[in-house]
Image (cartoon, rainbow, N blue to C red):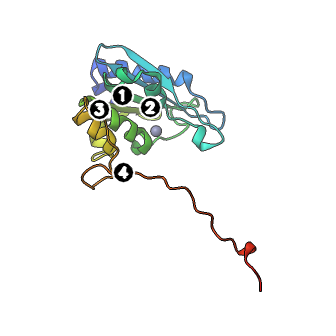
């Protein structure tokens, strides 16, 4: 992971970071004056933008990086070349000081993009910026999440796509037969003879 001045970015990188700033227009955060926008650049140069959503219940929220990813059809996701995210504080440069580590994607987003990289075989460049600094973070998804978890079913599918997928138990060779047995009635203490 590199940290460099925004002025040192290439024209293509600056355009993607600008698109990420536009993505913050789609952000929803009624609790705190902070918005995050993201953008992806596809292999054909098209850029797609999105913003984060923060809800009172955390599980309902979604980061800007995944908001963009989920806008794309599955086949399109394999054509992502680069991802940018930008933390924007409406109060200006000094409103919130965003440290370098906060300009990188969270673990959930890293995992989601790592799966895209795994399926496509194409690493994705990441650029992270914030309105509180002239610095940007440059990395790749593989750098951000090395040795990412992958489902054994997905691995099998990618290795032999024309064959049917058997659900196998990880680390056990060969298919495992899964048998569902009817639940046996259990003796409850309340039904016991108290004598
Ligand atoms: Zn995230």
Circle 4: element type: loop
User: Which of the two marks, 3 or 2, is nearer to us in this view?
Assistant: 3
Q: Which residue is mark 2?
A: 65
Residue under the image location 61 percent in, 34 percent down: 33
Q: Nearer the viewer, mark 4 or mark 2?
A: 4
Q: Is mark 2 within 8 Å of ligand 1?
A: yes
* Dot in front, 4 or 3: 4
First in sequence: mark 4 or mark 3?
3
Q: Which residue is label 1 attached to?
A: 83
Mark 1 Cα shell of 10 Å, populated few (<14), some (14-19), many (≥20):
many
Marks 1/3: CA–CA distance: 17 Å
Query: Residue 101: x percent and y percent?
Result: 40, 45
Say whether disc 1 or disc 4 marks the residue closer to the N-terminus.
1
Q: Label 3 belongs to which residue? A: 119
Q: Which residue is mark 4?
A: 177
- Alpha carbon distance from label 4 to label 2: 39 Å
Q: How many discs appear?
A: 4
| Image depth: mark 1 or mark 3 in front | 3
Mark 1 → mark 4, Cα distance in angstroms: 42 Å
Judge whether 101 appears above or below 9 on screen.
Answer: below
Q: Are marks 2 and 1 in contact (CB under 8 Å)?
A: yes
Q: Earlier in the sequence, mark 2 or mark 1?
A: 2
Query: The residue tagged with tag 3: helix, strand or loop?
Result: helix
């Amino acid at each position: 992971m590199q940290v460099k001045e925004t002025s040192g970015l290439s024209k293509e990188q600056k355009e993607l970071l600008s698109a990420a700033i536009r993505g913050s227009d789609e952000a929803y955060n009624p609790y705190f004056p902070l918005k995050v926008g993201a953008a992806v650049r596809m292999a054909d140069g098209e850029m797609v933008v999105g913003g984060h959503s923060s809800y009172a219940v955390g599980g309902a929220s979604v980061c800007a990086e995944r908001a963009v990813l989920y806008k794309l059809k599955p086949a399109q996701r394999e054509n992502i070349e680069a991802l940018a995210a930008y933390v924007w504080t409406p109060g200006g440069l000094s409103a919130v000081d965003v440290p370098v580590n906060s300009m990188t994607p969270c673990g959930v987003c890293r995992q989601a993009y790592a799966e895209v990289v795994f399926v496509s075989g194409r690493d994705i460049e990441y650029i992270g910026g914030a309105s509180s600094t002239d610095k940007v973070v440059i990395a790749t998804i593989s750098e951000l999440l090395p040795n990412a978890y992958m489902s054994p079913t997905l691995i099998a599918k990618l290795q032999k796509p024309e064959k049917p997928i058997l659900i196998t138990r990880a680390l056990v060779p060969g298919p495992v037969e899964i048998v569902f047995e009817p639940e046996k009635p259990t003796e409850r203490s309340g039904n016991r003879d108290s004598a």
